[in-house]
Image: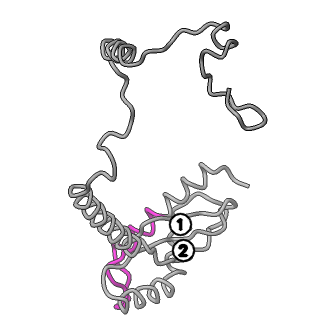
Amino acid sequence: MVDAQRARKMADRIHEIVARRLERGIKDPRLGFVTITDVKVTGDLQHASVFYTVYGTDEERADTGAALKSATGMLRSEVGKNITARLTPSLEFILDALPENAASIDRLLQEARQRDHESQTVAATAEYAGDADPYVKPRDEDDYDDDLDDDAADEVVPVLDEADVESGAVDDGMVEPDGSTR
C-alpha cells in the first residue's frame, strides 16, 4: 500500500496532465467540450479513474466517451512521460453525473422552498384550537392573598369538639352498618 497523500498527489498530477492534453486538442471530431472534474487513484497507484463532464446533449456525451476511450492509450503514454513513477497507471474515463446531481438538488431545493411557502401561508391563517396560551401562568402574590381572604369570608367552617359529636348534637353524616345515619 502507498501513502494516501502520495496517491492524492499523483491524482492531482494526472488531472493536470490529462486536462492540459485535452486542451491542446485530440484529433478526433467526436470529442466535445470536455471538463475533467476529478481523478481517483487506487492505493497501489496502478489504476486511475478520470471523471469528466461534457457540455451538450446525450449524443455528444456518448460520442465524447467513445473518443476518450479510443484516446486512452495516447493519454496514458502522455501521463507516463510526465510523472515520476515506476509504473504508469491505467486510465479509465467515467462520465461524471455532476450536472444531473446538481439539477436534482436544484429541483429538491425548489420543492422545499415551495413547501415552506405553503406552510407559511397556512400558519398565517391558522387559529388556536384552544386558548392562545394553554400554559397556566403563575399568579401574583397579591392575587393569591386576595383569593384566600375572599374564600375565607364566604365559607363558614364550624368548630366542633368531640363532645358535640359523641353526644349526637352534630350530624357528622356518618352511615351506620345497618344503613341508618347518626
Check disc 1 and give the amino acid type.
Lys
Image height of 41 relative to 165, above or below: below
Dot 2: within a 10 Å radius of its alpha carbon, few (fewer than 14), some, or many (20 or more) residues? few
In space, the residues marked 1 and 2 are separated at their CA atoms by 6 Å
Residue at x 56%, y 68% (from the top left corner): 80
Mark 1 near mark 2, Cβ–Cβ under 8 Å? yes
Quarter residue 170 falls in: top right
Q: Nearer the viewer, residue 4 or 78?
A: 4
Q: Mark 2 points at which residue?
A: 77
Q: In which quarter of the image is the C terminus?
A: top right
The image position of residue 139, as x and y in percent, is 35, 21
Check disc 2 and give the amino acid type.
Ser
The image position of residue 77, as x and y in percent, is 54, 74
Q: In this view, does 122 lie to the left or right of 180?
A: left
Which residues lie in the magenta part?
Answer: 15-34
Image height of 119 relative to 111, above or below: above
Q: Name the residue under label 1.
A: 81
The image position of residue 168, as x and y in percent, is 66, 17
Which type of secondary structure does the marked residue at label 2 adopt? helix
The image position of residue 135, as x and y in percent, is 39, 36
